């Protein structure tokens, strides 16, 4: 199975949640395969149940599986690492302190492993205390360059910048994008991204020169009645992705 995501023009890959295997297939087709479908570990009571179910997704979407925590829950970090070691998905979501474990257990470099860092209110700094214990302690604010160097040491592929709160942290996000571009690191903006702000958020990363961008769009494109991610919205996002690279 292919372990690396499929990017639009080798730059952008969308990340959305899948409510079912059928929903995942619909969204995969709507995005012309330039997508990762998130399935949350938190929805399963055991590793075995998660692995059995997620294998069904892998079979239908060419392994474009993104193993998720569940609302960034740091307590899911170890489970994500364990099941990803078995599943060998294209994408793994992690907290800052979990990236090294995931990479080691994967045993290969192709799968994208992100690491969650948070805004601090200070341009040029991020909070890396996002693990199960560290998230309960005082925030640890470090310079962007140091955070990226630490993540490279740990085998991570990208910064998962959460919560974006849309464009509430625009200046900080612009600095993150520039740092990722300067240090050959990938970027995954997430949290409060919708059809109205997606284009601007994506364009900031594209214009900064970020090598690979994986924007996460979750609740804003989910049908509140069915729980499905709307394929028609995925098509709209794909068009914005294409427009950003013109």
Image (cartoon, rainbow, N blue to C red):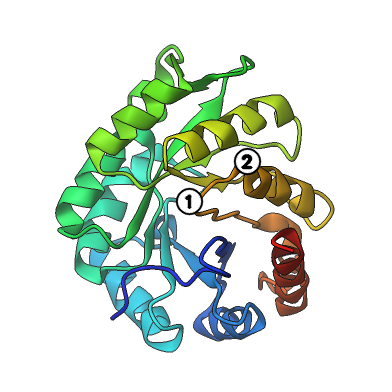
| Position in image of residue 116 (x %, y %) | 45, 38
- Quadrant in the picture for the C terminus: bottom right
Q: Is residue 34 left or right of residue 50?
A: right
Residue 28 occupies quadrant: bottom right
Q: Is residue 222 left or right of residue 112?
A: right
Label 1, on which residue?
70
Q: Residues within 10 Å of mark 2 (few under 14, many from 20)?
A: some
Residue at 26% x, 46% y: name it.
78
Residue closer to the observer: 169 or 57: 169
SS label for mark 2: helix
Residue at 22% x, 50% y: name it.
103
Label 2, on which residue?
208
SS label for mark 1: loop
Residue closer to the observer: 173 or 231: 173
**Residue 128 seen anywhere in this rendered image of the structure:** no
Q: How many marks?
A: 2
Residue 34 occupies quadrant: bottom right
Residue at 66% x, 73% y: name it.
228
């Amino acid at each position: 199975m292919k372990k690396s995501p499929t990017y639009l023009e080798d730059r952008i890959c969308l990340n959305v949640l899948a409510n079912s295997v059928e929903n995942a297939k619909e969204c995969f087709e709507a995005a012309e395969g330039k997508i990762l479908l998130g399935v949350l570990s938190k929805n399963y009571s055991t590793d075995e149940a998660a692995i059995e179910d997620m294998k069904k997704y892998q079979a239908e979407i060419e392994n474009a599986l993104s193993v998720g925590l569940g609302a960034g829950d740091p307590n899911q970090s170890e489970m994500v690492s364990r099941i990803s070691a078995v599943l060998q998905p294209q994408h793994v979501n992690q907290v800052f302190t979990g990236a090294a474990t995931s990479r080691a257990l994967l045993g290969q470099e192709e799968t994208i492993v992100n690491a969650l860092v948070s805004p601090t209110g200070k341009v040029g700094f991020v909070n890396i205390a996002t693990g199960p214990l560290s998230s309960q302690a005082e925030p640890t604010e470090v310079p962007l360059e140091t955070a990226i160097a630490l993540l490279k040491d740990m085998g991570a592929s990208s910064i998962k910048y959460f919560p974006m709160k849309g464009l509430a942290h625009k200046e900080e996000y612009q600095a993150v994008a520039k740092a990722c571009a300067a240090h050959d690191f990938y970027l995954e903006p997430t949290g409060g991204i919708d059809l109205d702000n997606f284009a601007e958020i994506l364009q900031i990363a594209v214009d900064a020169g970020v090598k690979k961008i994986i924007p996460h769009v979750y609740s804003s494109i989910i049908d509140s009645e069915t729980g499905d991610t709307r394929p028609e919205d995925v098509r709209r996002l794909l068009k914005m992705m294409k427009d950003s690279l013109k």
